[in-house]
Every structure is written in C-alpha cells, then in structure tokens.
Amino acid sequence: MLIEGYDDGPLDAGESLLARPGFWSNYLSEICAGGANAESPVPEWFGEDGADVDALSEILFDPERWPVLRVPSADGSGVVVVFRNLVGDCGIDFLLIHPGQSHAQQLASWEGELSGTGLAWRELVRIAENPASEADGVDGVDEPAARLLLLLPLLILNDLEVPEEASARLSAALTAVGVAQDIALSTTEHLLTGLTGRPWHDPAWGSPLSS
C-alpha cells in the first residue's frame, strides 16, 4: 500500500483488525482518559478482555507494520487512519481525501491528544453515514457504526456543543460493534467526558447513581 508522504513506512491494510477482540479498547481508551477527574479506562468498558487488548496492541503498534484504516465516502472524499509506528515518534495520523484528488492531506494526529484540524459533529456524521458503495470499487470500512467510532478522535467538541443525538448515536455504534447495551451507555459517558474535557452525563439516562 502506498500513501504519499509515507514512503518509508511499512503500510498495511488494517480493516480486518476491527473485528479482532481488543481493537476498540486500543483505539478509544485514550479518549476516555482525557476528561477532568477521568477514571483510568479499562478493557471492560468496551466489553473486552485485557489479554486480548494486549495481544492486539502488539499488532496495531508494531514498528514493522503500520495498519491503515480507510473510511471512504460516496462523494469521493474520506479519511485515512494511519498507525504511525515510528520508533520514537509513534502516533495515529488522520489524512483527508478530497474528491478527484489522488493524494491525501494531513488533517490531524493523535498522540495522547488531538493536534491539527478536527471535524465538527455534523461533518463526522456525514462521513460516517455515507460510505462508498461496492460499485465504486473502493476498499475500506463501510459499516456506519465502525466508521463513526474510527472518526471519533477527530471530533472537536466542548460541553456546550454536545448535540442531543450524540449520546444515542455513540451508544448505538458501540452496541453495533459488539459492546453490550448496558456497558455501551456508561462507555458513551466516558467518551463524551473525555471529548468535552469535563464529567458528562446524559440526563435522559437518569442518574448514574440510581439503580
């Protein structure tokens, strides 16, 4: 696989890794750790086992193999996620694909926090909900739930801008990738807390202290 600007990187199509146990913990846990007074994320938040998370981590962050996850859209645009497993300079890069262009533009990087240009919620949802069709002959992730979660680190959000639909969409997406519904609700709160930078709770779900 070739991507302009990554000539020295051993890029490898990584879409199949999404189905492996431990993927979502590896990919999203750092977001959960970003809020004020945030709890330390654990694999159980994603319905996963610690041993599976550790095993897949060795694959996802292998310096000899840099997984690439493509999120193409029907209009020819899209996002490419690259695990930049460069020794001493590792991170996750997000590249933007423009319609009609053969090269991808650096959009942002994640190295414990987002640097660069992110996406507004409506932009993220638009890309997630409009995958390229099989007729387009474009490889990549086509399941809207997985696409939404892959793009989530790009989301630029503060506590005054959380759309009413965000919690329901994120919870449904987590459930679609295999997280139990009761776990998905609390994990969504952890994710939104990390994204907004402060504790967050959806009033529609009732008090987290009630049972």
Image: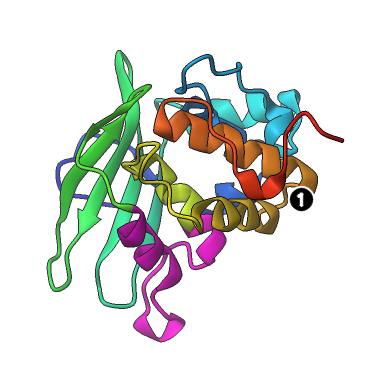
- Number of marks: 1
Res 106 quadrant in image: top left
Residue at left offset 30%, top offset 60%: 123
Q: Position of residue 117 (x, y in %)?
A: 19, 41
What residue range appears in magenta? 121-147
The residue type indicated by label 1 comes to Gln
Residue 41 drawn above or below residue 124: above
Residue 89 drawn above or below residue 139: above
- In the rendered image, is residue 112 in sight? yes
Q: Left or right? Give the position of 77 relative to 39.
A: left
Determine if the magenta segment contains residue 146: yes
Residue at left offset 31%, top offset 42%: 156
Q: Could you say whether the residue bearing mark 1 is in a helix, strand or loop? A: helix
Residue at left offset 14%, top offset 58%: 103
Q: Residue furthest bottom?
A: 135
Tell me the colour scheme of the image. rainbow
- In the rendered image, is residue 23 in sight? no
Q: Position of residue 94 (x, y in %)?
A: 29, 44
Residue at left offset 46%, top offset 49%: 150
Label 1 environment density (alpha carbons within 10 Å; few <14, some 14–19, many ≥20): some
Q: Left or right? Give the position of 3 relative to 202.
A: left
Quadrant occupied by the C terminus: top right
Q: Position of residue 172 (x, y in %)?
A: 64, 58
Near-viewer residue (62 or 183): 183
Residue 139 drawn above or below residue 198: below
The residue carrying mark 1 is 181
Determine if the magenta segment contains residue 110: no
